[in-house]
Amino acid sequence: MRRIILLIALITLAVASPSWAQRVDDEVDLKALYQQIDEAIDRYPHYVAMRQGQIADSEEKLLSETNLENRFALAEQLYALYKPFKNDSALYYADLCISLADSLHRKDMVGLYLSNKAHQFSNAGMYVESLDLLNKVERRALGPKQLTKYYEAWMHVCGEMGQYAQQPDERSSYFDLQDRYRDSVLAVAEKGSEEYLHLKMDVLSARQLYQDALAVSDSWISEVSDGTHEQAYAAFYRSVVYDKLSNSLMVRYWLGKSALDDIMCAVNDQASLFMLAERLSADGDHERAYRYVRFCEDCNTTFSPQLRNYQVRYVANVMEAAYKNSKESYSTLLTIAVIGLFFFLAVVAVLLFRLRSKGKK
């Protein structure tokens, strides 16, 4: 009897589990999330003013500081504030960090900011400049944290160059290098760090171990604060796993969460909102998709004067869909107008016929 009861309980649990998961998905309110994003976009000048206030405060302190170590710490703060906000200013403060680190005889920190600057260059599509800087780094002088950033910069530029390489052999070669540098990052990165976690999720997803990747994501999400750029990054990588699982609802939710956090942090280097806009366009929400992609375009040209290739693709896709939709809407309205005119003329013809018939009588 106990075995029968246990078997029934197990069957009930097995049947109930998918429906419970479905209920969790159904509780995701995308409409409310999009409304939050709309409101955050309206308040974006306020968020920008807050970041600019932090920048102004740090710059004022830097001007009055004479101690080299304190100046270096302030230059690091300013690099971090500008990194997702304005690329040319981030590059300026990376240079200042390199100069101050050299004066302090900190070869490890010189290497760190050469690597950081290289990453900023490749992120803006300047691959030759990125490679030039990375070849200047003295790898032997780097500690684990600096090596992580160095290998990560190499991984990024190789991936970017592979993405846009025209020849198959060249493309394959760059992607092979990217894989090697990914392994190098995982070998030296601190367990639980941002660099380690997102690459661990990439590796697990590549092996189709999606539930394991989500478990890593659970741990990562629990460690970051709500409304931060760090959470935006973690949310983005969670959306990537759900994309592999073809869970379109959760992809939109986590892209939306990532975009919302970045907007509230005055991040101009937008990615998640671009991707969400493309999906909204596919959903038929052309008006919101158009608004989001225009906002992203303004943000990203503030970050760096020219849109990068992948950003141009999102703008083009959304604009093309919006144009096609407006064209179809126009055709529909024209058809309705023609039909309406036909009925109007038919009614007029009937009335005229009746009036003539009465006149003859």
Image (tube, helix red, strand yellow):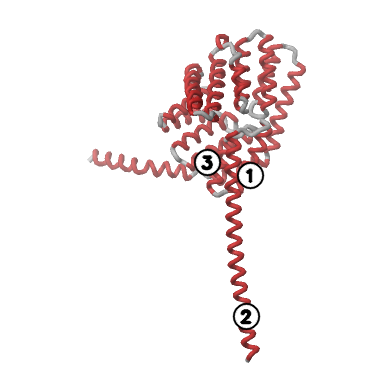
Q: Position of residue 42 (x, y in %)?
A: 67, 42
Q: Which residue is the site of mark 1?
A: 291
Q: Nearer the viewer, residue 161 or 49?
A: 161
Q: Amino acid at mark 3?
A: Arg
- Disc 1 crowd, CA 10 A, few/some/many (<14, 14-19, 20+): some
Q: Does residue 74 lie above or below 318 as drawn?
A: above
| SS label for mark 2 | helix
Classify 167 as above or below 5.
above
Seen at 50% across and 27% down, the residue is 171
Tell how many labels: 3
Residue 197 visible in the picture: no
Q: CA distance from mark 1 to mark 3?
A: 16 Å
Q: Earlier in the sequence, mark 1 or mark 3?
A: 3
Instruction: Indicate the quadrant containing the C terminus: top left, top right, bottom left or bottom right.
Output: bottom right
Outermost residue, bottom direction? 361
What residue did someone put label 2 on? Answer: 351
Element marked by disc 3: helix
